Amino acid sequence: MHPEFWHERWSHNRIGFHRDAPLPLLLKHWPALDLAPDTRVFVPLCGKSLDMVWLAERGHRVLGVELSELAVRQFFEERGLAPAVHETDAGVHFTAGAYELIVGDAFALDAAVLADCAAVYDRAALIALPPELRRTYAATAWHRLPTGCRGLLVTLEYPQAEKAGPPFAVAADEVHALFDRDWRIDAIEVRDILADEPGFVADGVTALSTAVYRLVRRG
Ligand SMILES: C[S@@+](CC[C@H](N)C(=O)[O-])C[C@H]1O[C@@H](n2cnc3c(N)ncnc32)[C@H](O)[C@@H]1O
């Protein structure tokens, strides 16, 4: 999926993936990760997600990465924050309070940038990508996180033939194929959400569920 696809979505405000409240499954499952409050959390493909606000309210520091500068600027504007801005090889860093959001490519972040992220949160990131980019994403952004890093991954499952992504369906066997080498994986919840997603029903999708995985980076 070309970066232009996402820039076009943001410039025309076609951001149906953006939620106006933190994800209930984050609130439900994050506490069980048992992270220290000041843990730094990596949020790849972060958009302007309010999940980052919820994480910061728990005392966490947030490192996001996002292709769209518009999304990052909106995130700070909507919080009434005036970020400091500096540039590195990773991209343009916008920093204020608990937040550091890099306008850049998640696949290009090196391990040094991610070194003090002891947690990771992926909602609408893996599933935003087509199959070949999912492999690249797992082999770059996730692979470069440090040993012991813990996190949540939220996916969608539906018959892919019934609708074109994004969001794409990512079944449990693919999650294992992508992450088993580097991560210990536990599926902690699978929930039927078809009744909550009239857009999918209107597109003819006959089954839709969301799955939450807890992952721990192996040494
Ligand atoms: C479906 S949206 C989800 C945003 C956010 N996670 C949320 O829950 O609202 C996917 C986002 O990933 C961004 N994106 C796509 N490819 C990217 C990449 N290679 N590096 C950084 N951001 C990327 C897009 O601009 C878009 O904002």
Image (cartoon, helix red, strand yellow):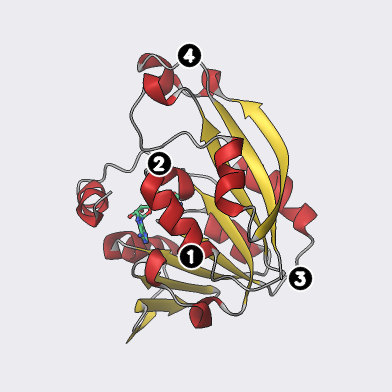
Q: Nearer the viewer, mark 1 or mark 4?
A: 1
Q: How dense is the environment of label 1, judged by Cα within 10 Å: few (below 14), some, or many (20 and up)?
A: some
Q: Is residue 83 left or right of residue 156?
A: left
Q: Nearer the viewer, mark 2 or mark 4?
A: 4
Q: Nearer the viewer, mark 1 or mark 3?
A: 1
Disc 1 residue type (three-letter): Ala
Asked which secondary structure carries label 1, the reply is: helix
Residue 18 in sight here: no
Q: How dense is the environment of label 4, judged by Cα within 10 Å: few (below 14), some, or many (20 and up)?
A: few
Q: Which residue is mark 2?
A: 17
Mark 3 or 2 closer to N-term?
Answer: 2
Disc 3 residue type (three-letter): Ala
What is the CA distance from the residue labelled 1 to the residue labelled 4? 33 Å
Q: Which residue is mark 1?
A: 141
Q: Are marks 2 and 1 in contact (CB under 8 Å)?
A: no
What is the CA distance from the residue labelled 2 to the residue labelled 4? 20 Å
The location of residue 64, given as percent across then percent down, is 47, 66
What is the CA distance from the residue labelled 4 to the residue labelled 3? 41 Å
Mark 1 or 4 closer to N-term?
Answer: 1
Q: Quadrant of residue 76?
A: bottom left
Q: Which residue is mark 3?
A: 36
Viewer-proximal residue among 27 and 103: 103
What is the CA distance from the residue labelled 1 to the residue labelled 3? 22 Å
Q: Are marks 4 and 3 in contact (CB under 8 Å)?
A: no
The location of residue 116, given as percent across then percent down, is 61, 79
Q: Which residue is mark 4?
A: 206
